[in-house]
Image: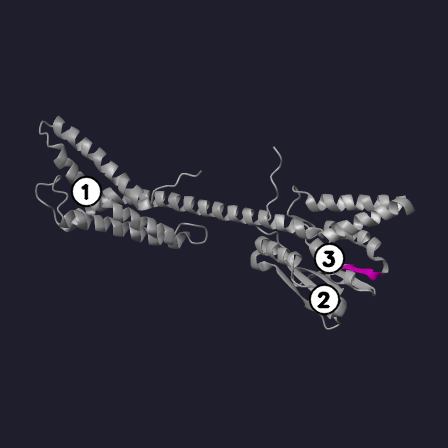
Amino acid sequence: MRLRLPPLWLLVLLWWIAYAVVYAGQVLSMSEASGHPEPFAKILVDSLSIWLTWVPITLGLVWVVRRWPIEPGRIGRALAIQSLAVLAAVLLRAAHMYFTNSIHVWFVVLPDFAAVALMSLRNNVMMAWMIVAAAHAVVLSERMRERERRLLQVEAHLARSRLEALSAKLHPHFLFNTLNSIAELVHSDPDVAEDVLVGLAELLHDSLDADQAPLRPLRAEAELIRTYLDIEQLRLGERLQTQWALDDDALDLPVPTLLLLPLVENAIVHAIARRREPGLLSVRAARENGRLIIEVANPLAAGGSAPGSGLGLGTTRERLRWLYAEAATLEHGPTPDGRHLVRVGLPLTRPANAADPAPAP
């Protein structure tokens, strides 16, 4: 459980009260050493009147640093604004001391404002810059906590999306039908049954591996889909026809792990498997205009209906949004030649949220 800090204004107030009490103790010691001791209550009141003026000044300087922090690309502008803020703080401090006569403890006769301003400039510039430096530490800490909070949100959301994706990766009917086909092949063709079992084991291992990286080359995704299609070919026979068009310069580009499986499975379960006549499943990938374009196309289902945007497409869209924000796209719909097309567009740069999993201890 994380300790919740008090608000900044309260911390600043407590700091300057503590500073005033310590200063009052020092003044008391000096007055006693001089042989003219003064009541501690009077000294404390004078000390509070002097140092509590730093509370609004400190909060103002923190606001300036939050608004214009020193950071790459804006150093000159930030230093100029902060220098003006420090000068304003020094002059405000001088005005307070002059018009409230809070420096009577130091002078028998109050000097003019110019002398007070010069004294404030000499004594308080360093204090003001120290506050500015501390404010930068506060701002940096706030930004780090905010980044940690956002990272935790992203990780939690990706974890939820991963659990949801598990149910969409392999349709239960696919597993049921594959196991039935294997049971039939055990007696008629044991070698083919063994090959299907090996393929199914590889598919399940890849789909349910919790330690796999969030990205991997398109080549690995294509190999997984070929294994999946080989198994579906056993069930659907000539009704499933495939066409691949993967450009060589796209095979080594990184894509989200298990990106294609729900798209291809969606096309087979909701379209090709519902048809009696052969259906062509097309998978294409190519670089276009600085992006990786991946397309999965299939014929419409019986009756001309197209696969909807169910759990497979919905989960894929959500994963893309969290990995790439608005840089990735997923579109789907009918084509002029009477087919259904899912088109995914990915940037060629690695997404910031695709951190590799930490190595095991």
Image: 260 above or below 52? below
Name the residue located 82 percent from the left edge and 54 percent from the top edge: 235
Q: Which residues are magenta?
A: 239-245
Q: CA distance from mark 2 to mark 3?
A: 12 Å
Q: Position of residue 216 (x, y in %)?
A: 68, 48
Q: Earlier in the sequence, mark 2 or mark 3?
A: 3
Residue 209 among those drawn in magenta: no
Pointer 3 or 1: first along the chain: 1
- The 10 Å Cα crowd at callout 3, few under 14, some 14 to 19, many 20 or more, is many
State how far apart marks 2 and 1 are (Cα): 77 Å
Residue 50, numbered circle: 1
For the C terminus, the quadrant is top right
Q: Which residue is mark 3?
A: 264
| Mark before the other along the chain sequence, 2 or 1 | 1
Q: Mostly what secondary structure, the magenta segment? A: strand
Horizontal side, residue 192 vs residue 209: left or right: right
Label 1 crowding class (10 Å Cα cut-off): few <14, some 14-19, many 20+?
A: some
Viewer-nearest residue: 213 or 82: 213
Going by the numbered disc 3, the residue's amino acid type is Val
Query: How crowded is the residue under tag 2: few (<14 C-alpha within 10 Å), some, or many (20+)?
Result: many
Residue to which mark 2 is pinned? 340
Residue 247 as seen in the image, left or right of residue 80: right
Which circle, 3 or 1, is nearer the viewer? 3
Label 2 amino acid? Answer: His
